[in-house]
Amino acid sequence: MTKSDDPVTIKKYANRRLYNTGTSTYVTLEDLASMVKAGENFIVYDAKTGEDITRSVLTQIIVEEEGKGQNLLPISVLRQLISLYGDSLQFLVPRYLEQAMQTFARNQEQMRQYMQGTLGQLFPFTNFEEMGKQNMALIERAMKMFTPFAAGSVSPRGEAEDTSERLDDLRAQVEALQRKLDDLSDRSDPRK
């Protein structure tokens, strides 16, 4: 996704201004959002302490976009994410989310290619709707699996469900969904 191996350095000053050292100009969060969309890599440092604050600035961009009505994160997902902080399975969440977003990005590109190939024809939105529903169902099931004491996850003996079994189940669900998405993609590709 990056255009360069060396990330651009952005410095954040006490007055909340952001300075792009690559272009020697002040930038806004909107400018940084545009850089992300363009595939430009950057790191944000606190100008005074030198601390890497990239994560908090990226989170701030998401909050700003959500505030503009660009609601990508359903409230239920936000609640589930918050509940995972401090959880024993917290370490699994970043890798899982990264994999889910990579899969989505691959499917997104396939959808774009298909839509470009069928320009001028009626778009078969039912395939995209089904793909979206399957993605959401997978994410919701996965998020529930990361909550070890969620309703229904305790055995009759009162012991928590075995974590490895839940992870195996999650892997199987991801693989099944990927097969379905590949099948949908193959069926909707006008070149096949």
Image (tube, helix red, strand yellow):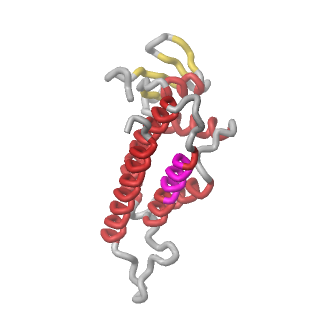
Question: Measuring 43% from the left and 33% from the top, which residue is drawn there?
Answer: 52
Q: Which residue: 58% across, 33% down?
A: 121
Q: 11 or 42, which is in the foreground?
A: 42
> What's the residue at 59%, 44% (across, down)?
72
Q: Answer with the quarter of the image where residue 145 lies.
A: bottom left
Q: Quadrant of residue 167?
A: bottom left
Residue 43, placed above or below residue 20: below
Instruction: Tell me: residue 136, above or below residue 46.
Output: below
As for residue 71 lying within the magenta part, the answer is no
Residue 134: percent from the left, percent from the top?
Answer: 49, 56
User: Does the rendering let one see residue 13?
Assistant: yes
Furthest residue toward bottom: 157
Left or right relative to 64: residue 103: left
Foreground residue, 10 or 184? Answer: 184
Q: Position of residue 177 (x, y in %)?
A: 40, 56
The magenta region covers 127-137
Magenta residues, dominant SS class: helix
**Quick one: quadrant of the C terminus?**
top left
Quadrant location of the N terminus in the rendered image? top left
Q: Along the horizontal axis of the image, is 115 left or right of 39? A: right
Is 185 situated above or below 120?
Answer: below
Visible residue check, residue 85? no
* Residue drawn where x is 48% and y is 28% of the image: 36
The one nearer the camera, 32 or 169, is 169
How far across and how far down the image is residue 101, in percent?
43, 44
* Vertical arrangement, residue 74 with respect to residue 14, above or below: below
| x then y, percent, for residue 185 | 42, 44
Camera-side residue of 72 and 44: 72
